[in-house]
Amino acid sequence: MSQRLNSAVATLLLATGCAGASAAMAADGGEARFRDILKELVETNTTLSAGDCTLAAQRMAARLRAAGYPESDLRVFVPEGHPKEGGLLAVLHGTNPKARAILMLAHVDVVEARREDWTRDPFTLVEEGGYFYARGVADMKTEAAIWVDNLIRYREEGFRPPRTVKLALTCGEETSGALNGAGWLAEHARSDIDAALAITEGVDGDLDAEGRRVMLGILAAEKLSQNYRFEVTNPGGHSSRPIPDNAIYHLVRAVDRVSQHEFPVELIDANRNYLLGMSKIVGGAKGEAMARVAANPKDAAAVAVLDEDKNVHAMLRTTCVATMLSAGHATNALPQRATANINCRLMPGVAIEDIRRQLETIAADPAVKVTIPQVRGPTALPAPLTAQILKPVEQVAHELWPGVPVVPMLEPGASDAQFLNPAGIPTYGVSGLFFDSDGGNMHGLNERIPVRSVYEGRTFLYRLIKLYASQ
């Protein structure tokens, strides 16, 4: 990074009251190269429809090769029949062959984005008003770029920790039904990714309306994303002769019943600890409600207060929502088929088949067939959030952001941890990246991340992996 850019970044941080983080960044160096890595990764389209994850993996491998990594420590893997859905494995060897590795895991595929809908080109990294804008800059190419940057920095420094540090960049996390690279590795290359623990996405840090850090989250558990199919078939007929037995009517009534159903609150360590931790931070009526629900999940009045926050609502229970509808075959004919996709986010330990049976009961119509089109992934209980995992996160967070609490969380979404935890690789989500209350509009229009957060997250993850590797 040039002196001018270093000065600009330092000024930005100091202006927001972050002298400690600013000093840490000033000592890091290599920011210009890191930005180039992020830019190249973001500007490599990796959508399922038109992108190429294999190309992104090859470009990141070239970066590591140029940094001195031998071919024996780099592998671009391409699953058979999926030429554009490949990924990258890379290794920085440790000194203790008996110590299990640390795995840095990231997916490089992104959600679809149409240029005509965006204010800026979604596949061009744009810096504007203190933010980076681009598809994937929040989810999760920034963290992927940091992982590549980490390996380059460690090699430059001659860092030789006891534990081996591994990198896995994968494809397919964002598209249900597509090949998932992390799942493929767990099944076909388990030894290559074996690790004492893996760090990936999951939860981030929260900023308030003034840009102040509220808390840094660490993923202690996550839900399983599972799709269910509602289908109604019918002989149909001519639209001039309507009858009550209409496939669309059966379907929409069943979907409406799903919209009105609320699954009960379920507390496990992850969301209970979140409620307890955040109750002290939030305060007021909401903080009180958090403490009450943590003590008694059947406290209906307190649950009602928390349900006004869509994020907390999703964290407390299994949820199901209609996401796609399809019906009919002609404008002048009664429909012969009507289908809906119901996307459910299952609490840890909840059986996929159990929810299917519950959806049958909720639909309350024998004409509606409820099936599981594809099992998204194996179910597994979350990895335990031990002191060995949590203390390094707290240590680095305190160094960079004194007074900002680290809060364990249950992530309502799902990450590739759902494939690694069942394979015996404890996987946790932590990024050191802080977002506005809308989460940077991940998956939406004009996805963004604060520039300040990107560079601070780089420092955070660089130090965190060093600590884990040195254990």
Image (cartoon, rainbow, N blue to C red):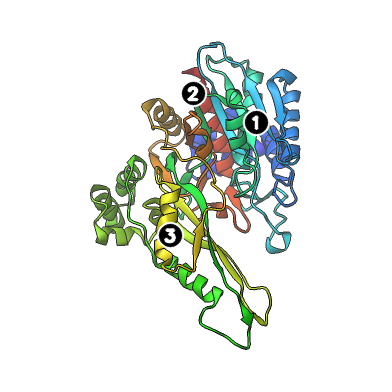
Give the residue drawn at x 63%, y 73%: 328
Give the residue drawn at x 49%, y 29%: 425
Determine whether, in the image, residue 192 is placed left or right of residue 421: right
Q: Disc 3 residue type? A: Leu
In the picture of the structure, the residue carrying the numbered disc 1 is 148
Q: Disc 2 residue type? A: Ala
Task: Decide which of tag 3 and tag 1 comes sooner along the chain.
Answer: 1
Q: Locate residue 393: give its quadrant.
A: top left
Quick check: 387 above or below 248?
Answer: above
Task: Decide which of tag 3 and tag 2 comes sooner along the chain.
Answer: 2
Determine whether, in the image, residue 141 is placed left or right of residue 364: right
396 or 12, nearer to the observer: 396
231 or 376, nearer to the observer: 231
Secondary structure at numbered mark 2: loop
Q: At which x and y percent is residue 102?
A: 53, 24
In the picture of the structure, the residue carrying the numbered disc 2 is 196
